Amino acid sequence: MAGTYGTSDLNDFRGPGYFNVDTSLVKRFAITEHKALTFRAKGYNLFNTVDFANPAVTLSSSKVSFGRISGVVNTPCILQLPPRLSNMERT
């Protein structure tokens, strides 16, 4: 009946789960008294898991897409290894 509450419970419709691990390791090497080389290893989506988007919720007569998952919400695994030469801070 229009204008009344339905019988659906809270969180009856949920999308797929999401899992992502980002990490960073940093090591600093002293070259001279005032210079240092910083080495970083960064990993985004380290385990390369695929996280699917929510299913389509539109109803149309021309195309059947209701409930179909047609995308992902994260990027593939990205690894970065940027070195950096810097001045050491004086304390």
Image (cartoon, helix red, strand yellow):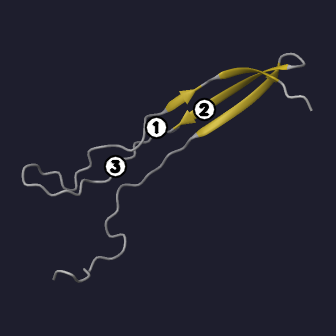
Point out residue 24 in the picture as x, y percentages from the top left corner.
64, 36
Q: Which mark is residue 35?
A: none
Q: Nearer the viewer, mark 1 or mark 3?
A: 3
The quadrant of the image that shows the C terminus is top right
Q: Which residue is mark 2?
A: 42
Mark sitting earlier along the chain (2/3): 2
Which three-letter amino acid code belongs to the residue tagged 3?
Ala
* Towards the viewer: 49 or 14: 14
Give the vertical position of 37 relative to 57 (above or below).
Answer: above
User: Quadrant location of the N terminus?
Assistant: bottom left
Earlier sequence position, callout 1 versus callout 2: 2
| Marked residue nearer the N-terminal end (1 or 3) | 1
- Distance from disc 2 to disc 3, alpha carbons, whole Å, reads 25 Å
**Crowd rating for badge 1 (residues with CA inside 10 Å; few <14, some 14–19, many 20+):** some
Kind of residue indicated by mark 1: Asn
Please, what secondary structure does the residue beneath circle 1 have? loop
Q: Give the percent coordinates (x, y) of residue 37.
A: 76, 20
Tell me the number on the disc at residue 48.
Answer: 1
Question: How far across and how far down the image is residue 57, in percent?
Answer: 23, 57
Instruction: Name the element at disc 2.
Output: strand
Q: Residue at x 78, y 27 (%)?
A: 28
Relative to residue 8, is residue 25 drawn left or right?
right
State if disc 3 and disc 1 touch (CB < 8 Å).
no
Q: Secondary structure at mark 3?
A: loop
